[in-house]
Amino acid sequence: MKADIHSHSSNSDGTWNVKKLLEEAERLELECYAVTDHDNLEGSIQALNFSSVFSGILIPGMEVSTKVDGRTVHLLAFFPKIGHDEIPDVHEVLDKVKNSRYHRMEKMVEKGIENGFKITMEEIHMEVTKDGSSADIIARPHLARVLVQKGYAGDMDEAFDKYLSEGKLLYVERFTLNYMEWIKLVHKNSGIVVWAHPLFYQEEDVELLRKSFDLLYREGIDGIEIVYPYNKRRGKLDLNYIEEGQSFLQQKIEENKLLWTSGGDFHGDNGILGFAEIDDEMVERLLRKIGIHYR
Ligand SMILES: [Zn+2]
Ligand SMILES: [Zn+2]
């Protein structure tokens, strides 16, 4: 079926609000869709209120960033229940991440000012709250957009390449969740964990990809996002690496009977909405695993 279960709203660093996303998902005739904002579940909570807008299956989800063996790994989590009163221990951990993002941004803006950039935290706040539905998750794309608006970079890619990526002029580290603790916490709350865009951040090295997989698998990861528009997003990957990496992951999925998913990682100004297909049987397995009734 047509299914895209990885996308971002203005509750994190996407530029569209949840209603607009759902209207577009409906227009594209998606049968299964998920809003998976960074570090918060507000987008998914809001989506449930717009069930009259979208007629397909809506899976509540989100995305977090962790480090595995020193390399960045993004993990999607899908839950059967997401309300603030329903999974308090998850929300508690997410609050901690949100605070650390705020302080990190303060430091990045400070660094910018020290380096002669005319930028302020107010401008970042305006970006964050622009679409009226923000959960106040502050992320680097917000600063990137300010840098582009002010002419310090030609586009988002350049803002990251020149200033915001790890090791670049304005980059500042932030607290990241421990992946082992996060996977345990999601499972404890009857959720599942899917490795998002696994080919990113592994230094385009299949050996490192294998290492990361082994560590994640040992902790009980449930699935892998296998259908992903790698070369339509930031930082193009080598085609041979994509081919080799994908076939390694396919093999692991089959060997271990893992779930696989597809996602366009839509942010409004990058990624794609409506990407692509998941087997009906796979969607059914995924929903069964989180205890959502299928049709
Ligand atoms: Zn991601
Ligand atoms: Zn994402």
Image (cartoon, helix red, strand yellow):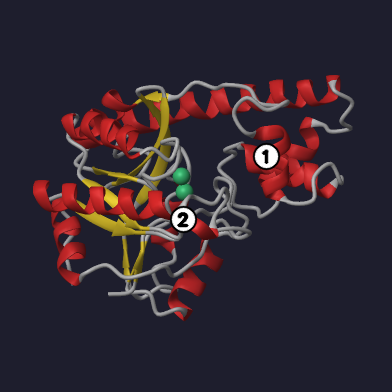
Give the residue displayed 17% in from the left and 35% down from the top: 220
* Mark seen at residue 230: 2
Q: Is residue 143 visible?
A: yes
Q: Is residue 290 visible?
A: no
- Residue 219 falls left or right of residue 174: left
Which amino acid, by three-letter code, is at mark 2? Tyr
Which amino acid, by three-letter code, is at mark 1? Asp
Mark 2 secondary-structure assignment? helix
**Rendered view: 8 above or below 115:** below
User: Relative to the observer, which residue lies in front, 222 or 241?
Assistant: 241
User: Relative to the observer, which residue lies in front, 26 or 5?
Assistant: 5
- 2 and 1 marks in contact (CB < 8 Å): no
Q: Is mark 1 within 8 Å of ligand 1?
A: no
**Crowdedness near tag 2: few (<14), some (14–19) or many (≥20) residues, C-alpha within 10 Å:** many
User: Relative to the observer, which residue lies in front, 97 or 4?
Assistant: 4
Q: Position of residue 116 (x, y in %)?
A: 89, 26
* Mark seen at residue 290: none
Give the residue displayed 63% in from the left and 56% down from the top: 15
Q: Position of residue 248 (x, y in %)?
A: 24, 48
Q: Is mark 2 within 8 Å of ligand 1?
A: no
Residue at the far front: name it: 240
Of pointers 2 and 1, the one earlier in the residue sequence = 1
Give the residue displayed 44% in from the left and 70% down from the top: 274
Q: Position of residue 55 (x, y in %)?
A: 35, 76
Give the residue displayed 14% in from the left and 59% down from the top: 285
Mark 1 secondary-structure assignment? helix
**Rendered view: 109 above or below 127:** above
Image quadrant containing the N terminus: bottom left
Residue that carries the numbered disc 1 in the rendered image: 161
